[in-house]
Amino acid sequence: MSLRGHRPLLLLVTEQLTSSVGRQVTALALPLLAIAHLSAGPLGASGLMVMTYLPGVLLSPLIGITVDRARLRRLLVTATWAQVPVVGSVPIAAALDGLTWPHLLTVAAVSGALNSAQSVALQSCLPRVVSSQQLLAANSSLTGARTAGLIGGPALGGLLIGIVDPAPALLVECAAYLIGGSLFLALPAALNRPVDQAGADAKSRIDALREGLAVIRRETLLRRQALAAAGLNLGGGAGSGLFILYASQELSLPSGQLGIVYAAYAVGMGAGVLLASSITRALGMARAIQVCALGAGAALFLIPAASLGLAFPVLVLYELLFGLLATVWSIAMTTGRQLITPAHLLGRVNAFLQAVLTATLPVGALVGGWLASHVGIVPVLIGAAAVALAGASSLWFPRDLLATVERTAQAP
């Protein structure tokens, strides 16, 4: 069934494109603002990043329960519009020369928590506005919108910051949130019917959390997804944290070539969005999940392999392959999770897995940086690739996992 002209999906895609551009502008403006106004060093910049991710991880159980019991349209609108005064307080404080570290860190934490809640709610919303047969194509569309924002957002941010101070550039994200909330408000009113109203009346939050964790323990696919995501993100986080230092210092890659390498990743992601449905149809959803995860983990070995020679083409090849395979894997796994999880528990399951994804990236980066200072960058990059490959390999065992995913994908 075609999604052309599907109004709710069009609203969601437009919101994802708008918010992705806004977040990328802020991702560039916020650390530059801390440097310009608060003389931030490496520790301050790292602290800002940690405060962006940490609340979503710590609050993930509460977020999951809230999403399952909430009126989803109202929650999406509230979480989005609440960002306007939070983020908007920064340029106001900067204009009044009253910006402080506690203020900036609080904004990063509150905005990060709201982003986490919106992300979980959006993943739980999608199966309620498209059919199960349309989920894969719908997830590809949303990922494509976010990818476009990843490409255009930094360029817009750099242009704005070159014209004005970083603080006024944050108003772009405020405008994006105003637009995004209006788009969510136009979603079907049926989304305001909670899917777990009975649970909200009968269960405590602890009981509701246990119910969600029971699904993850029971479903092999969900457990393996968490393990694979943890391994890929730990390894990928270590590699990402060292990548610029490795490419610029150990490989002596000029800045122009480094820019092309990063652009190759965006090209790979775009190809993944375009090819996700075709690859999944050709291999089947289960095999596509397994092959793409394994391929993404194996591609990380190309990073240390670049030290053997032909560094520039090898790194370009890595970015293309990893961007393509990781994108197809993410789309297929998200779709499989949405299909296999009962609707009234989807918020809790999404929140738990998002916490795994969010927590393991900075942990991988921090551990990788510490180890590299003791044993060198290349050995750590090899170890990081091995960790990622081991995590991805878990999707191949037990053997009946393949049949489980295929049954789920073919369910009406």
Image: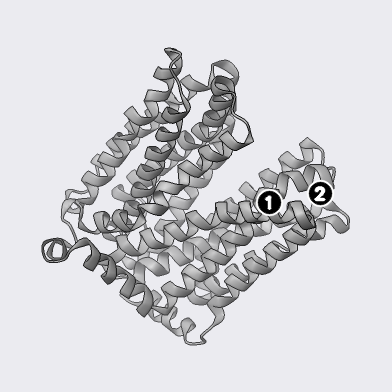
Residue at image coords 53%, 39%: 47
Quarter of the picture holding the N terminus: bottom left
Relative to 62, does residue 248 appear above or below in the rendering?
above
**Placement of the C terminus among the 4 image quadrants:** bottom left
- The answer to whether residue 156 is visible is no
Q: Measuring 53% from the left and 55% from the top, which residue is drawn there?
A: 273
The crowd level at tag 2 (other Cα within 10 Å; few <14, some 14-19, many 20+) is: many
Question: Quick check: can you spot residue 117?
Answer: yes
**Residue 369 bears which disc, if any?**
1
- Residue topped by disc 2: 312
The type of residue carrying mark 1 is: Gly
Q: Amino acid at mark 2?
A: Phe
Residue 324 pos. (x, y %): 61, 58
Mark pair 2, 1: CA separation: 23 Å
Q: Is residue 211 left or right of residue 292?
A: left
Mark 2 or 1: in front is 1
Q: Position of residue 73 (x, y in %)?
A: 23, 47
Q: Label 2, secondary structure: give it.
A: helix
* Mark sitting earlier along the chain (2/1): 2
Residue at 44% over, 13% down: 95
Which percent across, then down, holds residue 46?
57, 40
Mark 1: few/some/many CA within 10 Å (<14, 14-19, 20+): some
Left/right of residue 149 with respect to residue 389 in the rendered view: left
